Image (cartoon, rainbow, N blue to C red):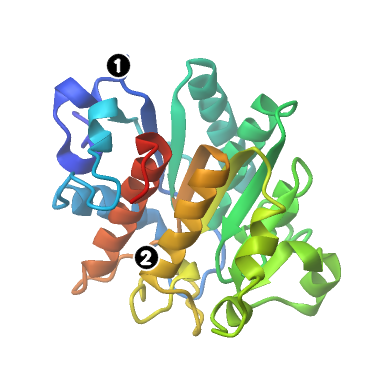
Amino acid sequence: MKIKQFGNISEQFSNFENAKVVILPVPFEAGNNWIKGADKGPEALIEASASMHLYDIQSDFEVFRTGIHTAEAIKEGKSHEKMVKEVEARTTQLLKKRKFPVIIGGEHSTGIGSMKACADYYKDKDFCVLQLGAHANQRQTYNGSAYHHSCVMARASEVAPVLQVGIRSMSSEERDNIKPDRMFYAHNILDSSNKTWMYDFLNKLNKHVYISIDLDVFEPSIMPATANPEPGGLGWYQVLDVLHTVSQKSTIVGFDVTGLCPIKYNKAPNLLAARLVYQVLNFRFSGLIK
């Protein structure tokens, strides 16, 4: 069966050998999410991407021309541990072939393997992991698993320095695990009188950055289709401003976008998620911010 290509991009620009970017769908959901359906997220995102205009106004660029290939999805659907190992192995293969990896989840845990692979590949090259999300996800284990989505950033912090942006929900256990100077809370970002948070954030960025984006970083009014929505999130242009600025300061080496739980009669969130993937790629490869 022919694999649907992100953006409905033609064979000329989606051929694996010539593509700079490879999108790896991971339709995995095994955690105890409040709202179910994250395993349907990658398919819905790719379907919505076919409706996008592929010209980006802000960068005056069409990143699809650099080549974007959508690979066969990882089908592991029950074991967190097996899924993480498979994502790590596939991401490592892509990095060795000098491809830029993009993981489309599934629940947030689908990004653990790609974080580990990038951390290993760039271990001697001033590397960090940046999370944009609502939840700290710093538990050591949850429901008997160290790879549950509640443990994602605890696993990331074992392999690289971690920065977290947009956080507005955590447990007392996580409060004791976090590094306060590397946590940028949503309420501080949204405080118009706080003029210094971006400066502080940028000063902590490393040269090479892997970005993990849980879609619940957004305000639920524009992104209601997530597994665990939290009030008080960031707006579209606020998130883009962070991603813009990161792309100017550092080299983005890969990223994941996770947590989309499609809503049957509201497909706007699917398009937001698809546009976000494409926007990050434009920022990464255009080299031009207007």
Specify whether residue 29 is in view: no
| Amino acid on which disc 1 is placed | Asn
**Could you tell which of marks 1 and 2 lies nearer the N-terminus?**
1
The N terminus lies in which quarter of the figure? top left
The quarter of the displayed image where residue 186 is located: bottom right
Q: Is residue 215 left or right of residue 150?
A: left
Which of the two discs, 1 and 2, sits closer to the camera?
1
Q: Which residue is mark 2?
A: 261
Outermost residue toward the right in this view: 176
From the viewer's perspective, is 251 left or right of 2?
right
The residue shown at (22%, 52%) is 57
The residue carrying pointer 2 sits among few (fewer than 14), some (14 to 19) or many (20 or more) residues within 10 Å by Cα, namely: many
Residue where numbered disc 1 is placed: 18
Mark 1–mark 2 distance (CA, rounded to whole Å): 32 Å
Q: Position of residue 254 (x, y in %)?
A: 51, 38
Q: Residue at x 37, y 47 (%)?
A: 289
Say whether residue 169 is visible.
yes
Task: Name the residue type under label 2.
Answer: Cys
Q: Residue at x 57, y 38 (%)?
A: 114
Q: Which residue is at the front of the view, 25 or 33?
A: 25
Q: Nearer the viewer, residue 207 or 262?
A: 207
**Of the numbered discs in the image, which one, if any, rests on residue 192?**
none
Q: For the residue labelled by badge 1, is the local secondary structure a helix, a strand or a loop?
A: loop
Near mark 1 (Cα within 10 A), the count class, few <14, some 14-19 or many ≥20, is some
Where is residue 148 drawn, in percent x and y? 64, 57
Secondary structure state at the residue bearing disc 2: loop
Quarter assignment of residue 138: bottom right
Q: Percent x, y for residue 13?
A: 21, 25
Left or right of residue 213, residue 203 in this image: right
x%, y% of residue 168? 61, 78
